[in-house]
Structure formats: structure tokens, C-alpha cells
Amino acid sequence: MQHNGNNSGPAHQRPAALTPNTNGHVNSGLVPATNGNVVVTTMNGQGPSSNGNVALAEFEPPSAPLSPLDPRNPRSAIERDIIKLIGQHLRSLGLHRTVSTLQEESGCSYDHHLAVKLQRHVMDGKLDQAIDDLSDLEHLLVGSNASKKMRFLLLEEKFLEFLVQNKTMDALACLRTELSPLKHNIERVHQLSSYLMMSPDNPELLLHRSNVTEARDLLMERLQRFLPASIMLPPRRLRSLLAKAQAYQVERCELHNKVDQPIRGMAPLTNDDGVRDLQMLEGISLLSDHTCVKDDFPCHTQQILTDHSDEIWVCVWSHDGLRLATGSKDSYVIIWQMNPQTRELSRQMSLDGHTFGVSCIAWSPDDSMLLVCGFQGSADLWIWNTISGELRCKMSHSAEDSLTTCAWQAGGTKFVCGGTKGQFYQCDISGQVLDHWEGVRLQGLQCLSDGRTVLGADSHNRIKGYNFDYMQDEHIVVEDHSIMSFSVDKTDRFALINLSHQGIHLWDIRDKTLLMKFRGMSQGYFTINSCFGGVDEKFIASGSEDSNVYIFNRCKETPIATLEGHTCTVNCVAWNPQFTDILASVSDDATVRIWGPLDPSRQPPAPSTQVPHGPVHDGISGTRDSSPRPDRDSSHAGGPAGQGTEKKVFYTSLITSNR
């Protein structure tokens, strides 16, 4: 048999064991290689064979690799930083023997010995010695006048501790002979001097009385801002990094719609600006990347309400989130009451008499009243009492008016209204016109929380800010296409604008800057009302002419969720302001859909079986009428099947008239 570098001899013959000979070579046989393969050595010390089957090499005594924690093993800077962070965290947990072992095996010291001495003197209350330590640390400090600023902080603590120990004369001497001569932060020195005459319930002094250790901890955190991290690690640095990692993952999660709770009993952490506002969060695992699932998002139909008999054009939640008002082409406004335990809605009352249908609804700030405007051609505005269901006032200023949009001003004693024929009124709750602007053709109104500024979208593709106190206006937004509707977030900083054939634009109305364009939904001629919503109003929801509801994350231009269920144009979407996992949508299919997270215990939603509009409140007399409402009369022939024909004709004529 020809030798090919494999073991010679019969296949069944086992090789002899390896034994080194007297000249240091190996006689024959096998030795295990360090990589787990087999190494064969030859009598004459030839090198490895080239056939790739078994490597041939001279026998060399194996050498054990250095342990990663062996001080002789060189470590990168990032590895040393990680060891320091782990050591600091273990020390905060009281695992001092473990820390000593880690420091000994790694050869890494955590803090500079001078910084350790400063910290010990501060925590022991030996503030004069801590001040002396500054001279040794001065060449290591960062920032301008760092030594003076640190000295001031130490003397400030010394002054406060004298006060809580009732050593008033010592405190006064510290103030006069040590703090004042520094000529630093004079305003704070004046404030400290007032503490000499203050009552003992001063919050700053109470902290020193109740927990001087915590006060010294806070002082040490402020001092550490002047020490580089290579000299002394910032306090709870590992937890701070993990808190930032949690916050980053939450921010990156497109579907995150929860109020995150900080871990109980854990003090706030200091951020990069020295402010204690970082929090470790409950429920956000550190062992895997955080991702929310759509089953926890309001993507699933919880309830279908079918009490309206024609196209529904608008829906608005009350400020307390417990009631929903919907307005329809059938001339009715229905107020629905939500059970906060079951999250189910039932009809509370129906309000009738809005001859041209209902195109705008606005809850008063205390939810006790409701403004209602009709559709194009309506010169009336209704003010309803939402507790009793009685008509409080019906405003009719002129038969030539067109009042199609309205909004409450802060305080609930005044409101504004207007329309596409040029009327723009400020009124009181009795319907009396207090002031007005001439010739402003309005598509929408929003009032800011300052109680003075009213935003109005007009027929010139603009949103302007109006001040009725001084009768002044200013340009806020100018678009290239017709504005169909807009809304403002709770901070009064951002506006969401629905544009004809252009989707939705997000504007910063304070800086007058376009921030984002959202695409994916279909919007041409019909008026679609979008909204902000979710926790911190992180999301945007919009209806669409393709019968879907689209939800966007404010940081992403394409939808993160598409809600299917309606069969005609979705005209309006409203996100519950208190129950942030509930969404309402209304459509030309005459239904209201309530959306929420997936609930396996809930039965599939079925249309409500209540008699349409009974009992109701008559819009003229305010009396109850228990008779059922007919499904439709001849004037409503363009209902769900007609897909909002009246709206389309109206909006087309409006665009034509603007040109």
C-alpha cells in the first residue's frame, strides 16, 4: 500500500501511543492539537503534510494562554472602563470583597487616590479637610475657575450644616469670612444670608436635618462635575448608561404607547447636564432589545356603533376621555358614555335639529357645553348643555352667514366661529358677538391655551394667528396647496395639517418650520380630520378615502399601522386624551368604530342594536322625543353608497372659487 501521509498499516490496526525518544523527538503516534484536530509527528521531524488530511508537526509542549483577567494580559481602554463600571456598581451594592478581588485580578483601580480622599472627607463631614484637598487636585480639575466653584460648594455645605446644628454664630462667621470673600455667585450668598432669619421649615434645611448623608451625596455629585471621569467615575455611572440605553430603545420603538414607570426606590440619576432626571424603567428588560407588539396597540376593533343613519363627518372626545360626541349628515349629534372599566360605549343622548348636518363639534374646557356647527350653507351655531341635554343657545347672526367651524377659548366663557363666506366672530356663551374680523374665509379654527391666540386656516393656504384683544394677526404657516383641516397638539407647539392631494404635514408653529410630511393615506377632495394621540402624543392618526385608518409615528413618514374595517371614506379620527390606547373613527358608512389593543377575552364586535336616535332632544324646543328616526329621507340619498357626494361637490367649488 502506497504511503499518502495517512496512518500506514491495516485499517483495523490502532496506532501506538506517542512516546518521546531520547533525542526529544516523538517516535510515532498521535497527540491532540490545541484546536481539537489531530497532529501527527514524524521520526525525522518533517513538517506538516500538504494533502490537508492530517497535519504533521514537531511536538511542542503546549503553553496555557493568559487568562483575560491576568494582569499580564494587556487590556484595551474600553475593557478597563467596563471593569471600572462593574466595580463601582458592585461597591454600591455592598459587595466589597468581590470588588477587592476584581481589582486585584484585573489590576484596574477605580478612582484616583486624591479623589477618594476628597470623597471620604465630604461624606464624613470634614469639610475643612475637603477644602484643603482641593490644592492637591487643582491640576486635575476641568472647567474655568473650577477650584473656586468647588470651594464655594464646600463652604455652602459647611454653612448649612452649621445652621441645622444650631451653630448660628459659626454659620455667620463662615458666611462673612469665607463665602463672601470668594466674590462668587453673589446672588446665592444673599439667599444663604436670608436663611439665618428663616423658619426651620426651609426645604433645604429640612433635607440636611432629615438626611445629611443624602445632602452630602448631592454635594459630591455637584463636585464631580469638575473632576474628569478618569479621576473619579460619576456616581452610579453604570445605571446611568443603562437608563440611557432604555430610553433610547423606547424612543426607537415605533409602537411604544405606555407610560413608563421608574423602578421603585431608586433615586433619579444625573444626566449629562448635571440634572437628576434619568430613571431606570420598570418592564424594560436589559437582557434583550425592547420591542412592542401590535397586539398591545389600538389596532383592533373593540366596538361598532351604528346608531347614526347617514354619513358621519366628525367625532371628538371630551377632555376627561369618558364621552365621545359624533356628528352626522343625518342632522344628529350623539354623545356616547364610556365605561372606564369595560371600555365600552353606550349612547347617553342624541341632539337633533342641525338642518344641514354636523361638520364641527367642540367641547368646552370643562366638558359641560358643546358647540355644534352645520355644513356649508348653515348660518346657525348651537350651544348644548351636555349634562341635561338641553339647548342652551342657538346663535343666528345673519342669514347670509356660513358658520362651519368653531373652537372654545381658554376659560370657557368665549368662543370663536367662522366659515367659508368670510365670517369670523368672537362670541360669549349667550351667542352675542363681541368682535369680528372681516373677509376671512375659514377652513378651520384652533384656540391656544394662552387664552389670546386663535389660529385660523383660510382659503389662501395659510394659517394665521389672530389676537382679538389687540385685533392683530400674523402669518404662521403658508402652504402651496389647499388646507382642508388642521389640529394642534397639547403643547401648542406643533400643528398637523391635512392638505388636498398632499397628505399630512407636521409644522413647528413656534419656529414656523415644516418638520415632516406623512404619506400613505389617500386624500383628495373630501375633508379628512387627523389628530395627535397616544402617550406624549407620540402618534398621528388619520382617516383616508380608501376606507382605512392610518397611524403614524411622529418620527416616521410612512404608516406604522393600517386599520381596516370601514367600507367607505373615513372622515375623522379621534384619539382618547386620557385612555391613550383607545381610538375612535367615523366614516361615510354611517358607523363609529372604537379601536383598542387585542383582548382575547372579548367577543368579536357586532354592530350596536339600539334604535337610531331614540330618545332624542329636539334642537328647537329641547324636549325629549322617544320616536325612532327614519333611516333616511330623499335628501340623504347619497349616504354610504354615495360616498360623500355633497362634500366632494362643495370642496371642488371652493377650490374653483379661490382661483
Image (spheres, helix red, strand yellow):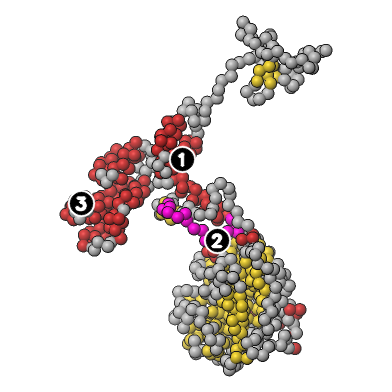
Magenta span main SS:
loop
Which one is earlier in the sequence, the residue at label 2 or at label 3? 3
Query: Which residue was labeled with disc 3?
Result: 174
Relative to residue 618, is residue 657 depicted above or below?
Answer: above
Query: Residue 486, image x and y in percent?
Result: 59, 73
Q: What's the magenta region?
A: 253-269
Q: Nearer the viewer, mark 2 or mark 3?
A: 2
> Residue furthest toward the top?
22
Which one is earlier in the sequence, the residue at label 1 or at label 2? 1
> Residue furthest toward the bottom?
621
Relative to residue 41, is residue 276 depicted above or below?
Answer: below
Viewport quadrant of the C terminus? bottom right
Can I make out residue 183 in this image? no
Q: What's the CA distance linking mark 2 and mark 3?
A: 50 Å
Query: Which residue was labeled with disc 1?
Result: 86
Tell me if mark 1 has few (under 14), some (14-19) or many (20+) residues whose alpha carbon lies within 10 angstroms of its own: some
> Residue furthest toward the right?
1
Label 1 sits on a secondary structure element that is: helix
Tell me: 37 left or right of 492: right
Q: Which residue is depicted at the point 52% across and 28% down?
A: 67
Tell me: 633 left or right of 129: right
Q: Which residue is depicted at the point 65% across and 21% down?
A: 33
Viewport quadrant of the N terminus? top right
**Tag on residue 258?**
2
Q: What's the CA distance linking mark 3 and mark 1?
A: 40 Å
Label 3 sits on a secondary structure element that is: helix
Q: Nearer the viewer, mark 3 or mark 1?
A: 1
Q: Which residue is depicted at the point 58% across and 59% down?
A: 256
Tell me if mark 2 has few (under 14), some (14-19) or many (20+) residues whose alpha carbon lies within 10 angstroms of its own: some
Which one is earlier in the sequence, the residue at label 3 or at label 1? 1
Tell me which amino acid carries mark 1. Answer: Ile
Tell me if mark 3 has few (under 14), some (14-19) or many (20+) residues whose alpha carbon lies within 10 angstroms of its own: some
